[in-house]
Amino acid sequence: MTSPDTGSGLRSDAIAWFELTAGIGGLVLVGWILASQWGGVLHGHPAYAVVLLVTVAVSVQAVLVAVMKRRRRTPVRIAGRVVLLLLGIGGIAVVGWLRPHTAVEPALGAMENEGAAYVLETPTRIIMHPSGEDAVVGVMFQPGALVDARAYAAHLRPLVEAGYAVYIPKQPLGIAFFSLGAFDDAREYFPAVEEWVVAGHSLGGTVAALQADDAGADAAGLLLFGSYPASDMSTSLEAAVLSISGSEDGLSTPEDIEASRENLPADAQFVEIEGASHAQFGSYGLQVGDGAATISNDEARKQMVAASLEFVDSIAGY
């Protein structure tokens, strides 16, 4: 026989303390994410902002439930609360892991809509193309996991200024696998583009390789920034390939890049930038697990841009 609680849930129910802690923890986490990565949240795909709002709502509910008086405790209700508590803690961990890497200079300055480049940012994509003309060669670029799409603007704007269109999707929750339709979107947005280079950084490059290898993709080129394919496409991929890597990359290591040769066509080109790290393929600060770069961000970017521009020029027939 069960008996009614005679006081507050906190005084009579140990589970309530965990619910209260989880609820407050969720609110603190959201506050920390907004304070530390506000730009990445504001300029990212709306999906993550929605996740944060849901986290706030659920956290507030957890706090209210924890302090409410309860009439009766049964094994079923207790088991249900434990399950919800565990799910909530797991959800908080996922929300924290999805915290974005916000773009920094010079990427932010490269987002300016001026000069030879027209730049348009929407909630789901970044469009860059030459001012006053229709490009016939385009680059669809997949950002790395959890990286603000703006972080690649300084690396890609020189391509635009050279006459090429650039399409950067804002991936839902910062995961490229949730943006598999981006290549189709790019082709729809730029109907005048005749040749496409599918590109990406890190996980974005892995997904770009899948998109380029798709039977109906008809991609002319695959450009990898510190990345490699997840499977063997050495005979199926018909696009030209350039893999740009860094000697100090701690995430897509030189060993990983070397091993990827057998999964790419025999004529794939490889350029290793001496002293470059994984995070230098964008402008978003340091990254956990990365190596220590021995060249400056400006020098790394300069070499990456030069190699990329030469490759895209070859696709354009220059």
Image (cartoon, rainbow, N blue to C red):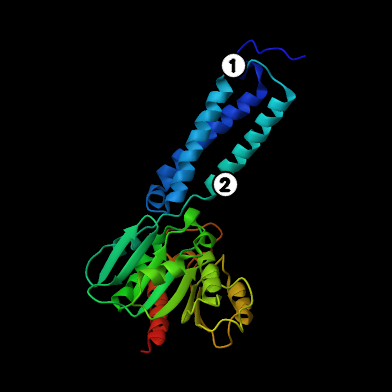
Establish if 127 lies above or below 123.
below
Q: Nearer the viewer, mark 2 or mark 1?
A: 1
Q: Which mark is residue 91?
A: none
Check the picture and name the quadrant holding the C terminus.
bottom left
Residue 86: quarter of image: top right
Residue type at tag 1 = Lys
In the image shown, does 301 or 133 lie closer to the viewer? 133
Residue at 37% over, 74% down: 302
What separation in Å lies between label 2 and label 1 (alpha carbons)?
30 Å
Across and down, in percent, residue 257 comes to 58, 75
266 with respect to 142 (left or right): right
Residue 111: quarter of image: bottom left
Q: Which mark is residue 69?
A: 1
Check the picture and name the quadrant holding the N terminus.
top right
Q: What residue did someone put label 2 on?
A: 94
Question: Which badge, 2 or 1, comes first in the chain's sequence?
Answer: 1
Residue 310: quarter of image: bottom left
Establish if 116 lies above or below 52.
below
Residue type at tag 2 = Val
Residue at 60% over, 81% down: 261
Is residue 283 at all visible to an observer of this figure? no
Is residue 218 at all visible to an observer of this figure? yes
Indicate the secondary structure of the residue bearing disc 1. Answer: loop
Across and down, in percent, residue 180 comes to 51, 65
